[in-house]
Image (tube, rainbow, N blue to C red):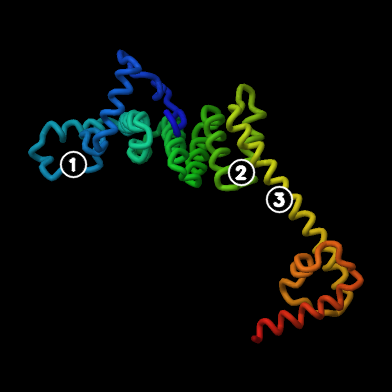
Amino acid sequence: MSGGENTEDDDDVCLKDREGMTKSDNKEQIHRLDAMSISSIPLFMNELPTDAPENVSLGAIQALLYEGPPKEQALNFKNQGNECYLLGPPGWKDALRFYTRGLDAKCCDDKLNATLYLNRAAVNLALKNWGDTIRDAKEALKLDPEGSTKKAHVRILKAAISLGKVAEARDAYNIIIKEPGMGLDDELLKEYNNFDEETRKEEGKKAEREKELDKIRKIVAGTGVTVVRGIETDLISQFGPELDYKQIPSVLVILKVENVSGRSS
């Protein structure tokens, strides 16, 4: 499925063809469902229609989702979320709602709840809800650290790269490459390497700039000149790192006068 990522499912991997259906049949069914509103399908409705009391069969179908103990409800919602996810972009928001309902069932099965969080993280990733992706993946790790490790950290890595969260991206990457049996596909590895390379370039520029500013701070400290906020940066931007630092006191005075003049005008 283009644009999405496999959701975690400990019963039946949701991207496998349905039993007894050819790929052609499966594709035809998905296209048929794409053409209609997912919310119009009884099992997928967010609310019952106004004639629900008279529509006994519809009420009975929806009641199935809320029947049984919390674990059974959570499992039903997980399965419905997986079905929605199979539809691609048209079903992703509905999948998000079903996984959330599964978590709202508050069952006591940590592995099932971790799966719901992992699946919701995958949908949030597909929907570009980067922050929610990271939060859901971390919740999965709390509930099932061993079973969630690879998929959770891969989803965290992807979201962190998109958000420009350097520390989280590096942490996730380091965990993935150190864990036995884990690894990154070529596309994600290339994306991370590009991200890391660009980040290191920026970090290098900031470090060089900080060195120049530190030289200025040390010289200015002994001049008795009151430095107007921002002048240190002005020195670098206007005169460059080749500035003769012996001239700094006189330059500071000029810049201070200009700043004061600029603020009063």
Graded by Cα atoms within 10 Å as few (under 14), some (14 to 19) or many (20 or more), the crowding at tag 2 reads: some
Q: In the rendering, at what x and y percent does residue 186 appear?
A: 60, 27
Where residue 225 appears, as percent x and y from the top left, is 83, 79
As drawn, the label of residue 173 is: none
Regarding mark 2 in the picture, which secondary structure is present there?
Answer: helix
Q: Which residue is mark 3?
A: 202
Specify few, some or many for label 3: CA neighbours under 10 Å numbering under 14, 14-19, or 20 or more: few
The amino acid on which the numbered mark 3 sits, given as a three-letter code, is: Glu
Identify the residue under disc 1. Answer: 48
Q: Assign the N terminus to one quadrant of the image.
A: top left
> Which badge, 2 or 3, comes first in the chain's sequence?
2
Q: Position of residue 133 (x, y in %)?
A: 48, 41
Instruction: Reply above or below: 205 against 88.
Output: below
Q: CA distance from mark 2 to mark 3?
A: 17 Å
Q: Residue furthest bottom?
A: 264
Q: Are marks 3 and 1 in contact (CB under 8 Å)?
A: no
**Badge 2 amino acid:** Glu
Residue ID at (33%, 38%) = 94
Q: Which mark is residue 168?
A: 2
| Residue 122 to residue 168: above or below | above
Q: Residue at x 60, y 47 (%)?
A: 165
Estimate how packed mark 1 is, as few (under 14), some (14 to 19) or many (20 or more) residues with alpha carbons within 10 Å: some
